[in-house]
């Protein structure tokens, strides 16, 4: 088949050309390497920041306190009602006894006081711990729950939660923007470097045109060459992300600033995905760079 | 049969210079025609329009049934596969051997490997360079490099060979060597040859059709003509 014959020749020529123009190839490869390292680090950082936000959001619990005189029957009904609400993910019941025991366990003073209480004296309230599916709608859900009869109070850290969400959303958007901007800059940089290297082969391209090569046939070896350059250029960034992140993770034992809330993403399989992403970006950018660069010389 | 028909062609460059005025020309299959004229007479422009490096501003150019003037950039290869082109500066790939330079023309159009080998060797035999297959261009004399370029131009067995001052960089002996090669290609392979030149020795010796251009206008067209100074 003609198309396979051509493809075989293109791959062979691309290989040859990487080595024949080695110093120029090296320039492109170094450019890809350096920019990809920056991109890879920013991807790691962004994904981790997103992860902090996610962990935090998952951790938010709403506490629904019931009036003291609520009967067991009513409680059952309320629990059913809660479980069937749209935004409610899980409902956990804590009787006032549970709360008492829990609190008593935290300090000696509290325990000595609470031991005095019997069932009727216990001023604490039965309550539900609720996790929501969509943290953005937590306020609406809280309002809705508030309307249920026998619900005394709903507490979810109103105000602070909203602020945290806004802050994290802003961070998420900004970091995403930074990554996209970096990738765009990378593409530009690489396109320009490859343009320089292809400039020296202008003659070769014009001869190909003269002897009747179609534009597609001319572009192909350059695009394949760009792919090689992308692969070669992403080796070091991949090693750095993989081993670098592993070392980073182990050094901090998974938690940044030793805070349980700022949890790093587990390296496996996370780093493999990132490595793959870096490779794919390298290949695409290399191919795109060559394509754009060679296109310029196809007009003669 | 008519291979080339140039009809009312005018070429104006973007800088305002008009290189060719209202040119009308027919060239038959198997012809050997010189286009002569001084610098700026428009002979190179005519050649460039024939292989569609330049587009005419007005008029029509038909080469082997293809309307060259209307050919889109992406389709130019269709025309180029029908013709061979030879330049004053050879335009060889310096990092490829003689064999590779000639085979290149067939490789890029996707010919089969055995066909490439057969045709490449045949073309190099025609130009008398079968003994230098593995040499690189910088190891060859100017005449030999030009013969490699001719081999590359005819390897695809084109109907038309365009030569833009092919002997411009060569001394008289080497020039005659090149002309012998071109003549044999014309006579033995039946290839139509159009050659722009200002070398009067060659024109006078070969006695072929002579088309004379002056300041972009056709001023003379002679069968078996010679280089006449009054015309230029």
Image (cartoon, coloured by chain):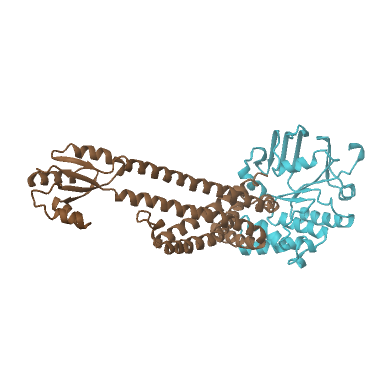
Chain colours: A brown, B cyan
Residue B1 visible in this rendered orientation of the protein: no
Q: Identify the residue shown where x is 54% and y is 62%.
A: A236
Residue A237: percent from the left, percent from the top?
52, 59
Residue B197: percent from the left, percent from the top?
83, 46
Residue A20: percent from the left, percent from the top?
67, 62
Q: Nearer the viewer, residue B184 or B15?
A: B15
Q: Quadrant of residue B170?
A: bottom right
Tag count:
0
Q: Nearer the viewer, residue A81 or B22?
A: A81
Judge whether B25 appears above or below A6 on screen: above
Residue A141 visible in this rendered orientation of the protein: yes
Q: Identify the residue shown where x is 52% and y is 48%.
A: A182
Q: Quadrant of residue B172?
A: bottom right
Q: Is residue A53 left or right of residue B221?
A: left
Q: Tell which residue pokes out farthest to the right in this image.
A: B230
Q: Identify the residue shown where x is 73% and y is 37%.
A: B6
Q: Nearer the viewer, residue B18 or A61?
A: A61
Q: Name the quadrant of the C terminus of chain A.
A: top right
Residue B89: percent from the left, percent from the top?
79, 52
Judge whether B16 appears above or below B64 on screen: above
Q: Is residue B190 left or right of residue B112?
A: right
Q: Quadrant of residue B183?
A: bottom right
Q: Is residue B215 left or right of residue A53?
A: right
Q: Is residue A3 left or right of residue B50?
A: left
């Amino acid at each position: 088949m003609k198309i396979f014959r051509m493809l075989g020749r293109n791959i062979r020529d691309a290989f040859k050309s990487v080595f024949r123009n080695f110093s120029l190839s090296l320039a492109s490869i170094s450019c890809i390497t350096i920019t990809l390292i920056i991109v890879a680090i920013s991807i790691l950082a962004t994904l981790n920041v997103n992860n902090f936000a996610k962990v935090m959001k998952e951790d938010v619990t709403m506490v629904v306190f019931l009036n003291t005189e609520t009967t067991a029957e009513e409680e059952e009904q309320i629990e059913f009602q809660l479980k069937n609400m749209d935004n409610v993910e899980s409902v956990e019941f804590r009787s006032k006894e549970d709360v008492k025991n829990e609190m008593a366990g935290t300090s000696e003073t509290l325990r000595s006081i609470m031991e005095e209480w019997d069932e009727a004296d216990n001023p604490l309230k039965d309550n539900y711990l609720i996790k929501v599916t969509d943290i953005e709608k937590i306020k609406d859900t809280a309002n809705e729950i508030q309307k249920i009869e026998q619900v005394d109070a709903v507490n979810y850290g109103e105000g602070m939660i909203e602020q945290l969400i806004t802050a994290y959303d802003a961070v998420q958007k900004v970091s995403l923007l930074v990554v996209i901007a970096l990738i765009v800059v990378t593409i530009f940089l690489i396109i320009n470097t490859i343009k320089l290297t292809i400039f020296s082969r202008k003659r070769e391209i014009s001869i190909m045109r003269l002897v009747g090569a179609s534009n597609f046939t001319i572009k192909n070896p350059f695009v394949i060459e760009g792919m090689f350059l992308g692969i070669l250029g992403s080796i070091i960034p991949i090693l750095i992300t993989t081993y670098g992140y592993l070392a980073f993770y182990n050094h901090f034992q998974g938690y940044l600033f030793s805070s349980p809330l700022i949890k790093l993403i587990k390296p496996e399989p996370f780093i493999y995905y990132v490595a793959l992403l870096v490779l794919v970006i390298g290949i695409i950018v290399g191919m795109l760079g060559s394509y754009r660069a060679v296109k310029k010389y196809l007009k003669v | 049969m008519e291979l080339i028909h140039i009809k009312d062609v005018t070429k104006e460059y973007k800088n305002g210079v008009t290189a060719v005025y209202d040119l009308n020309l027919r060239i038959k299959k198997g012809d050997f025609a010189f286009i002569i004229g001084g610098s700026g007479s428009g002979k190179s422009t005519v050649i460039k329009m024939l292989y569609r490096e330049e587009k005419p501003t007005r008029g029509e150019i038909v080469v082997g049934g293809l309307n060259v003037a209307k050919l889109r950039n992406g389709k130019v290869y269709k025309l180029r596969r029908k013709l061979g082109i030879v330049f004053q500066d050879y335009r060889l790939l310096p990092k490829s051997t003689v064999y590779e330079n000639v085979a290149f023309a067939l490789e890029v159009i996707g010919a089969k490997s055995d066909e490439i080998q057969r045709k490449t060797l045949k073309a190099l035999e025609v130009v008398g360079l079968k003994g230098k297959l593995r040499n690189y261009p910088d190891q060859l004399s100017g005449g030999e490099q030009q013969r490699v370029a001719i081999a590359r131009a005819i390897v695809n067995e084109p109907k038309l060979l365009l030569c833009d001052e092919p002997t411009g960089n060569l001394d008289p002996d080497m020039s005659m060597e090149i002309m012998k090669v071109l003549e044999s290609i014309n006579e033995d392979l039946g290839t139509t040859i159009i050659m722009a030149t200002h070398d009067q020795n060659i024109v006078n010796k070969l006695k072929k059709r002579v088309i004379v251009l002056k300041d972009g206008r056709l001023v003379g067209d002679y069968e078996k003509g010679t280089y006449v100074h009054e015309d230029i």
